[in-house]
Image (cartoon, helix red, strand yellow):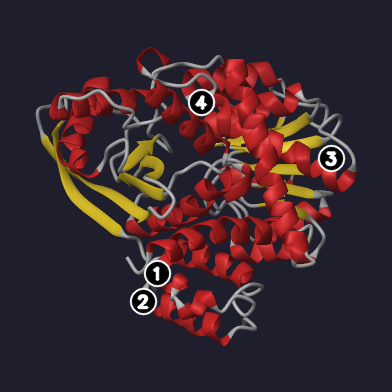
Amino acid sequence: MYKSLYLNTLLTDVKSKYRNEPEFIQAVEEFFDSMDFLVEKDPRIEKNAILERIIVPERTIEFRVPWIDDQNKIRVNTGYRVQFNSAIGPYKGGMRFDKSVNVSILKFLGFEQTFKNSLTGLPMGGGKGGSDFDPRGKSDAEVMRFCQSFMNEFYRYIGPNTDVPAGDLGFGAREIGYMVGQYKKIVNEWGGVFTGKNVSYGGSLARPEATGYGLCYFVQEILKTFLDTDFKGKKVIISGSGKVGSMALKKAHDLGAIVVGMSDINGYVSDPKGLKVEEIIELAKAKGEFTKDYIANHPGVKHSDRSRDLWNVPCEIAMPCATQGEINIDNAKQLKANGVFLVAEGANMPCDLEAIRFFNENNILFSPGKASNAGGVAVSGLEMTQNAMHLSWTFEEVDEKLKGIMKSIFQQCYTTAAKFNQPKNLALGANIAGFLKVMDAMLAQGVC
């Protein structure tokens, strides 16, 4: 499969050893697609077993979380933290509360996070964590009791110079607040141990907007560099109505795009003339979803109760912002048939490996999540800086820094890919640029 016998042997070993971890295997295989351009040119990689070390987490933590629901019944969930790589800084990455959470998903997320954080230029390693606890339908009191029980064990493994978690799917400002409160009580210390906090106790302005805004800033750089154009008048579809999708919707609209389709957990809606952006944002902000109310308010709008049908909507730019595994090879072919020329990931690994390869083989510009959705962790890094310095920047200051970071990430991806005569292969550029910084740190620190 690869030119490198070393990579083929290593991938076979990964698939055998982690055969029950499909998400993690995909992340490694997609990464190896890029490493095939590099490993034979840099013998230090194989000589120092860099890949063998980098694909194994430094630490995987698993613990039980007992809590009491509103009916006074004891419930038990499992808590996790995958501390993947700390070569360039303390572990940094979100926490996910969802029934789907398992070690495979957290390992793929932590693996990707390592290179994403490297690309930001900030001193942050990679990690990811969470629980199979589902906060949907739970009262605030139940969520608080769960978070407090979770932190009673979790506090041992985190700290501002050790591991700084953040939010993710099912883990927002409410959950962060409860976690921070319990951590502070246990260790008797206020510190920037979480990012994504409320502004009233150390959070950063522009953090809720950062991932979606950063995605659009990255897309702007792609459009300018490869097509000498911008968002104005471009037909865009966006999946997911959470913070990433909603903020990408807002910023794309502000930059002149016509958003013709959008989805949430209940399905999708589309309108070739453009959706009512302000209405969708208000509905999503209030309920976390919007399609049912939007359809009721606009009975003539085209819709489906299958979220994946969004990829059948004709468009020029597709931005998957919901979750992993949204776009498969059939969806990729349909997007091409309907006129897409750019797919930019706002979620983590929403496109499967076959789809990514199809985009690259069919001259469709593609940006991987580790690059184009790095705005969230970038502003988390800025939040850490503000906490350490005991100050707060304005929204405009943070947004301007975010633009600069996303521009720098794009330039790293573009120039690195160009060195391998693949200037449009931004996944190649992102993987290699992110990897090289981590590798240099690992080499400097010896075998550890």
Which residue appears at 38% of the width and 26% of the height?
388
Residue 201 picture quarter: top left
Give the vertical position of 304 relative to 445 (above or below): above
Q: Secondary structure at mark 1?
A: helix
Which residue appears at 32% of the width and 44% of the height?
130
Q: Secondary structure at mark 4?
A: helix
Residue behind mark 4 = 207
Q: CA distance from mark 3 to mark 2?
A: 43 Å
Q: CA distance from mark 3 to mark 1?
A: 38 Å
As shown in the figure, which amino acid type bears the numbered disc 4?
Arg
Q: CA distance from mark 1 to mark 2?
A: 14 Å
Question: Residue 228 vs residue 14: left or right?
Answer: right
Q: Where's residue 17, x and y in %?
A: 36, 76
Q: Where's residue 262, x and y in %?
A: 66, 34
Q: Secondary structure at mark 3?
A: helix
Q: Secondary structure at mark 2?
A: helix
Residue behind mark 2 = 17
Of residues 354 and 438, the one drawn nearer to the viewer in this rendering:
438
Q: CA distance from mark 2 to mark 4?
A: 38 Å
Residue behind mark 1 = 53
Residue behind mark 3 = 224
Q: The N terminus appears in which quarter of the rendering?
A: bottom right
